[in-house]
Structure formats: C-alpha cells, structure tokens
Image (cartoon, helix red, strand yellow):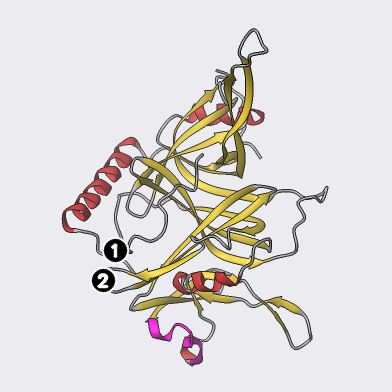
Amino acid sequence: MANKVDLGCKQLRGTFQMSGKVSGRLSQGFFTEGTSSNGKAYRKCRFGVELEQGKTVYMDLFGAASDFCYISKRTTLPGGKMQNDTQQIPWSKRFDFEKDPKYKGYQMIGVTCGCRKVTDEKGVEKNLVRHLTPYDACDEIQNLRDNQSIFVRGNIEYQTYNGTHRVNFVPTQVSLCKDIDFDDMDYVCNARFTQPLVLMGVEANKESGEYDVQAKIVNYSTVEDAEFHIKKDFSGLAKTMKKLGSYVHLKVHGRIAVEGEVQQVEEDSEWGVQTNPMERVASPFVRKLIIEGADPQSVDKESYSEEIIEHAIEVASNIQSAKNDYGESEDWGKSGSKKSNFDDDELDDPDFELGV
C-alpha cells in the first residue's frame, strides 16, 4: 500500500448509503478508460442515482492497474473481538487467488458489485456478487441499465480544484435491489451520510432560512474546507453546535438532499405598471449535506485544535509543493470531467439538543 502520510491528526472518513434508480448509463462519461503517461491502464465510471423524480446524485469511481492488490479476511478472536488480516497479492492473481488454500476465506479489498442477476440451482433469481478492485468494478458496473433500482454505499471525498470545493461520492458497494416506485404513496427517499468533522462555525442564513455549518475535513494528505446545512426545524441542534466553538471534533449524520435553487428574477411587462417579480428555478438543482443529528460522545476539543490543524495544513501544503516541483508520481491522462458533483440570530438558547 502507499506510504502513510502523517498530518499529525487522524483522517476523518465520511460514508454514505442511498437507494434509487440508475441514470446516465447512455452518457459518454459513463465509462472511460485509457493509459497514463507511465503506462498504467486506468478506468473511470460515473453514473447517477435518481433519489426522487428528476433529483439525482452522481457516483464517481476510478481505478488503475497496479503491480499488486490487497485481500483481507475477518476472524473472530476469543472474547468476541474481531481481527482483520490483510495480504498483498500479485495483480495477475486477483481473479483466482481463492484457488490457493492459504487464502481461503479472503476477499478482495475494493468494491462489492451485484450488478447482474443469475438464477441459482433452486431457480431463484439473485444478484451475482463479486468483490473487485476499483479498476475491475468500473467494468462490472457497465452491466447496469437506466431505471434499474440499486442500493449504493461508499465513501465521501472532499477536494479542492481551481479554488472550488467539491464533494465526490465514491461507491464501495453497488447492488441491484427491490424495485423502487417513486409514485408509491409509501415511498421514502433513502440517502443518508455520516461524517466526522472539525467544526469551525455555525451561522444563520437569512436568505435560505437554514443554518450554514463550516467545517474542515482531514483527508489522507490534505485538509479541506466543507459546508453543511441545518434546517430551521433543527434549530436546537444548530444552537448546540454553535456553542461548541471552533476546532472541535464532532461526528454528525443526516441526509443527502437534492433541492431546487430558487432566485428572484425581474421581468418587464408592457401591460403592467411596475416590473413583475417572478420565481424560477436556477441551476436547476444543488446537492446538500443536511445535518440532522450528532453524537455528543464524539465531542473532542483537543485532538483537532487550531495548532494541530494549522500544522496539518502546513504539512499538506509542503506535500503539494513537492508534487508541483517534482511532478505527480501518477498521471491519469485527460479523459474524464473535473466538474463538481456537489454544487451545494437565534443561536443563544442554552437548551442542549443534538438532534435525532
């Protein structure tokens, strides 16, 4: 595996899970592949998960061929404690390592795919489950078709590109699921996230009627700015988080929302005496991470102090400067898009409330 980058504080990994319908299967950006300048083959896959009619969140998966890949086995020790054992195997053995008795019970570390249906010996149709490297998973995901119902879980990645903060949803599981009917009266959107973060501030946004939450996310080799939101219905949560102050570790959870962005547009009418304000949807949608709760046991005011975060930012900056001076170790060509996936007064009450 890659050498560990020491920023002086632990990485904060966010996760998500959602169910919906496949979209974007026929777009040119759904699957791309190529060869980098160092001769390594790579693949990219980008597809949408429609959560509600016309409201879609996009998944991004990238994988590159390598000299090695990794498998793991989980065992239960006396007393109930779980232990993971990880082994490195040659890339060429990734499809047949299970034939080796010493690797019995091991699974590929990467993406769990259930993108095809098969019929078992009893005549029951079920998912063909495969544990694949991200490189191979990109190819397997090509079996999906638009409007199929799927369940996806994975990791949330935060990046900055040309000064723009981006949020990427990177799948670790893609599985066909029970058919979803958006018109069903009992249908409830399922799109949730969990994110440990370094809280920087909470402010009321009078324009949106929400509370904006500013945070920093410690990645593998960078420290990224991120924005979350709290709805007015959870004002108690917003007040509690604001009282915590800045540079405080907190684990939050909530829903991934796709909302129309409404703006005021003035349009002249020759039949009217004044301009006529009209509302129209602009963008047309933005993706937001809406916080609905937090874990009070996760509050930590020491591990991510201002001094520690500033040190982490300095280390990350030095890493980036070295890459700029000596070049990236990997170059994955020019295919694929850099477009962002995430276009995303009353705080003095002493009541303590960390939401649902």
Q: Amino acid at mark 2?
A: Asn
Query: Does the stretch in magenta take in 96?
Result: yes
Query: Does the stretch in magenta take in 51?
Result: no
Q: Position of residue 199 (x, y in %)?
A: 45, 36
Q: Position of residue 18 (x, y in %)?
A: 63, 55
Q: Earlier in the sequence, mark 1 or mark 2?
A: 2
Taking the spot 46% from the left edge, 87% from the top edge, the residue there is: 97
Q: Is the Cβ of the residue at disc 1 closer than 8 Å to that at disc 2? A: yes
- Where's the C terminus, which quadrant? top right
**Gap in Å between the C-alphas at discs 1 and 2?**
7 Å
Q: Looking at this rendering, what residue extends furthest in the left direction?
A: 325
Q: Nearer the viewer, residue 182 or 311?
A: 182
Q: Position of residue 318 (x, y in %)?
A: 21, 48
Q: Which mark is residue 331?
A: 1
Marker count (numbered)? 2
Taking the spot 60% from the left edge, 72% from the top edge, the residue there is: 143
Horizontal arrangement in the rendering, residue 248 relative to residue 324 (left or right):
right
Secondary structure type for disc 2: loop
Q: Nearer the viewer, residue 244 or 19?
A: 19
Q: Looking at this rendering, what residue extends furthest in the right direction?
A: 185
Horizontal arrangement in the rendering, residue 64 relative to residue 261 (left or right):
left
Instruction: Report which residue position mark 2 lands on.
Output: 38
Q: Amino acid at mark 1?
A: Asp
The residues colored magenta run 91-99
Q: Nearer the viewer, residue 3 or 207?
A: 207
Taking the spot 56% from the left edge, 22% from the top edge, the residue there is: 207
